[in-house]
Amino acid sequence: ASFPGGRIPLPAKDLLDSSAILSASPSSNQNSAVDALSENSPIQETRGRKRRAIRRTLSHLLQSAASASTRRARSTTSKESEAVYGVPPPAIDKGPAILALALLGTKCVNAKHIGAVVGMSVYFIGLASWCAAPKIGSTDHNPIVNMPSLPSKGHVPNLITNPLGAPLTNSRVYRTWLRVGALFGLLLPTMILAQLSLGSKFPSMLAITEWMNVGNVGEVKRIVGGPLFLLCFQALTEAVARTAFLPLPIRILIPVSYNTLRLSSLHSWAFSQSPSVMPQPLHALGIINLFYWYANLFLFLIPVGVMRYLRAHFFCVEAVEVTVRKGGEGSVGLLP
């Protein structure tokens, strides 16, 4: 959809009128008497009907494209999914929720982590309710919410469905960065906790690997399980926010908040007060996680993610028209 709401602006209408008149005008070598046809002649009336038909057809096409773009933005709720339009949003992945319940069942989570998750969930639910609440002066015919997630009329740019931009999300560096985080922050801690939990019931499993012989299994499980529990709830909250199509500023606030909250638990893991309890490989894994999530917060989320999400929300939702100075496209973060 090229025009918001499928409505042709006045300059475009004037251009259509002028192009139709020019295309219908006689050649320069024709008689001047033929050029002076009256407005009520049959030929002129036929030309007028053709112009009106063209205008109605273009308006219908633009309105259809605007409706399709709205449906596309509402149905595309995952940044990793392909552009499948017109289908219901995908179901929320149950993997993070199952892993979080398993961590609770095996006593790998402290009470402070549970309290932190409950507090964060209540906070984001309150923010979502405030965003959807109507402003003072809003009516049924003209509803105005505190923070909209979509433009008020029709045209929905693709930038809303992928605020980071396709060049970044499809790049090898970005995908490698996510895989490194999944390996050190999710897969390895899960394998270690599974072996520790099973080793408490089957001691022979821990005897296979000497480096897993920890002094206090319960304490190590809670140290390693805390950051993993927060990561699971971060993934679950992000999935719910995409499905509910919350405004972009709220959606980027979720990973920033959980990443910041997770750093304190990683400090306890990387700099354990009782080194004799924590084996050296587990200690090294904690240091790697600490450096990774610090880099993820200060080198990606804040300078790249927050900036692009806020710019996408302003350009695509809040602003009606944005005029960029000459040569300033790069500094304002316009994405292809």
Image (tube, rainbow, N blue to C red):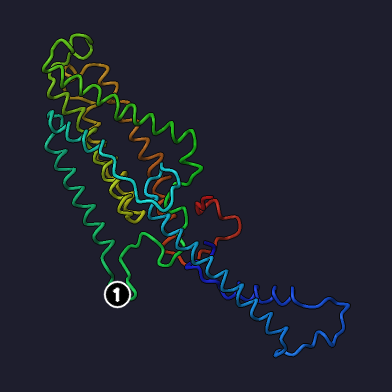
Q: Is residue 73 above or below residue 50?
A: above
Q: In this view of the protein, which residue sits in the foreground, 165 or 92?
A: 92
The spot of residue 44 in percent (x, y) is 71, 84
Q: In this view of the protein, which residue sits in the foreground, 224 or 172?
A: 172
In this rendering, would 97 be left or right of 322? left
Residue visible at 43% across and 31% down? 176
In this rendering, would 35 be left or right of 251? right
Q: How many marks?
A: 1
The spot of residue 126 in percent (x, y) is 21, 57
Give the residue number, with chain letter if any, for mark 1.
Answer: 140
Q: In this view of the protein, which residue sits in the foreground, 34 or 162?
A: 34
Residue visible at 17% across and 31% down? 103
Q: In which quadrant of the rendered view does residue 229 lie?
A: top left
Q: Is residue 26 above or below residue 312?
A: below
Residue found farthest to the front: 42
Query: Is there any visible trace of residue 254 in the rendered image?
Result: yes
Residue visible at 61% across and 77% down? 52
Q: Secondary structure at mark 1?
A: loop
The spot of residue 212 in percent (x, y) is 21, 14
Question: Badge 1: few (under 14), some or many (20 or more) residues near its Cα, within 10 Å?
Answer: few
The spot of residue 294 in percent (x, y) is 34, 35
Query: Is there any visible trace of residue 163 in the rendered image?
Result: no
Q: In which quadrant of the rendered view does residue 32 lie?
A: bottom right
Amino acid at pointer 1: Asp
